[in-house]
Image (tube, helix red, strand yellow):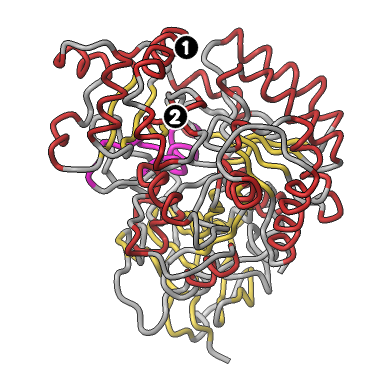
Amino acid sequence: MAFDLVIRGGTLYDGTGAPARRADVAVRGDRIVAVGALGDPAPEARRTIDATGMAVAPGFIDVHTHSDGWLLTTKNLASKTSQGFTTEILMSDGISYAPVSEHNWREWFYYLRALNGLEPEAYEGWHTIAEYLALLAGRTAQNAASLVPYANLRVLAAGWGRGPLDDTQINIIRRQLERALDEGAVGLSTGLDYIAECFATTDELVEVCAAMAPYGRPYVTHVRYKKGTLRGVQEAVEIGRRAGVPVHISHLKAGSPAETERLLHYVDRVAVNEVDFSFDIYPYLAGSTMFSYLLPYEVWEQGPLAAKERLHDPGVRERFAMLLECFPLDPARISLAWCSGKAHDALRGKTLAQVASQRGQTAAETVCDLLLETDMAALSVLRVGGDTLVEPFLEHPCFMLGTDGIFFPHGQVHPRQYGSAPRMLGPLVRTRKLFSLEDAVRKMTSRAAERFGLKDRGVVREQGVADLVVFDPERIADRATYDAPHQMSVGVQHVIVGGQSVIADGKAVETWESHLPGRAIHYGR
């Protein structure tokens, strides 16, 4: 019987970390049906890819993304598929577009514009995560799985403000979490420096996470980085230990060798012994987040729409100025990556210090005024030091790849959106020699699939889903830079999602015979 696709003559890196071997791969429908030497002459197939001299690997899985809005509106998000990513785990950092209610969805759209760029006109009436994911099936080139964002749960139960939650509110959150897990969500995410969830206590999070213990799914957390990374990781481990759930730290890194040593010493001596522990990071030290991340938590007590008005308050501005003086990053290292409105296009790429100097203002005044002028929609890149500082985390056995990528087609965004996977497979293997190519592939495939319950993905084997990448191991490399981020990587020749090509001969596929291949993925299914 003929195959739909045969990949011939490649070197297979199957995702398990086992030594690479020469193997053909045959696909029928959306499944891999044969792996090994398929013989001569070549078997009959509707399409054959000659992979001689190429590496063949499972499709890469990005475990920390901000593609939530873009997958809804973009058929082929080439900044990600061109790297080999076939699956994205959405709703990171505890903030996203679901679950929402009729009363708060507009506020969530307003708050998230600098992270996902989705406008209210894109709202299609969903309320639950399952309803949101169902909209993606067949209209995007990538697969999507989802975490449960904690801030959304907390707002449904208790509104935007601070204060301890009562038993009824905790029970509402637990029930909403259980519902999402029953529908296939792969874990619970928090971002404890962000809106609403910044007010959550350790005890509150333990009570909520305990509802997840029977499911065996991870507590995935952007810890309280503003209080210090080590303290934040210690709190996360405490939550996991007390609640009986695995713990996964989002974008774990450090700004100095001394801090790196302290963090990894804690991970190796304590964290891995107290909980089922893992973390993600991308191969750059610089970060990127909404400009509003810098604001004091009090600004968010009445929700996103009211936050803008708080920035007119002289008292709030005064307190923010004092807070910014304590922020562990000089304004000369904080740049404006994107903001709404063409009036501010000239500011993109400039540092906060440069913009403040041009305006004759302090850095705090400039942040407040920029957020007022852009209707709270501005994105920053935080340059904290050399990329080699992140390498000890990339080498660690608890690591898996999460790009934390944020996309705006006209912004001066962080290059991680375009270059994370190729940097892992190319320069970090060939030049830095941090790990073997087999191990690099494993960190982006089976490690993630196992952690997040992505059945039949992450390993090239018979009956596995046909999510595949063909790349040139001698040429693959990132090209995106901080000054010129919108540069596609090189070396990825073919990307297959569910048996269909989304990258062919190094170029993004823009037309399909029928529906697009992306699917909603549910835990263990």
Q: Residue at x 62, y 43 (%)?
A: 443
Q: Is residue 72 above or below residue 475?
A: below
Q: Residue at x 38, y 29 (%)?
A: 310
Q: Give the x, y percent position of residue 256.
A: 54, 11
Q: Quadrant of the N terminus?
A: bottom right
Mark drawn on residue 328:
1
In contact (CB < 8 Å): disc 2 and disc 1:
no
Q: What secondary structure is marked by label 2? A: helix
Q: Which three-letter amino acid code belongs to the residue tagged 1?
A: Pro
- Residue 393, position as x, y percentages in the image: 61, 26
The quadrant of the rendering that contains the C terminus is: bottom right
Crowding around mark 2 (Cα neighbors within 10 Å: few <14, some 14 to 19, many 20+) is some
Task: Tell me where residue 36 sits by quadrant.
Answer: bottom right
Residue 385, can we see it?
no
Query: Is residue 393 or residue 55 the one in the foreground?
Result: 393
- Label 2 or label 1, whichever lies nearer to me, is 2
| Residue type, mark 2 in image | Tyr
- For the point 67% across and 23% down, the residue is 232
Side of 293 where 90 appears, left or right: right
Residue range highlighted in magenta: 410-429
Q: Residue at x 53, y 84 (%)?
A: 3
* Residue that carries the numbered disc 2 in the rendered image: 293
* Other residues around mark 1 within 10 Å, as few (<14) / some (14–19) / many (≥20): few
Question: In the depicted view, which residue is nearer to us: 39 or 326?
Answer: 326
Q: Position of residue 33 (x, y in %)?
A: 63, 77
Question: Which quadrant of the structure image shows residue 506?
Answer: bottom left
Does 58 lie within the magenta span?
A: no
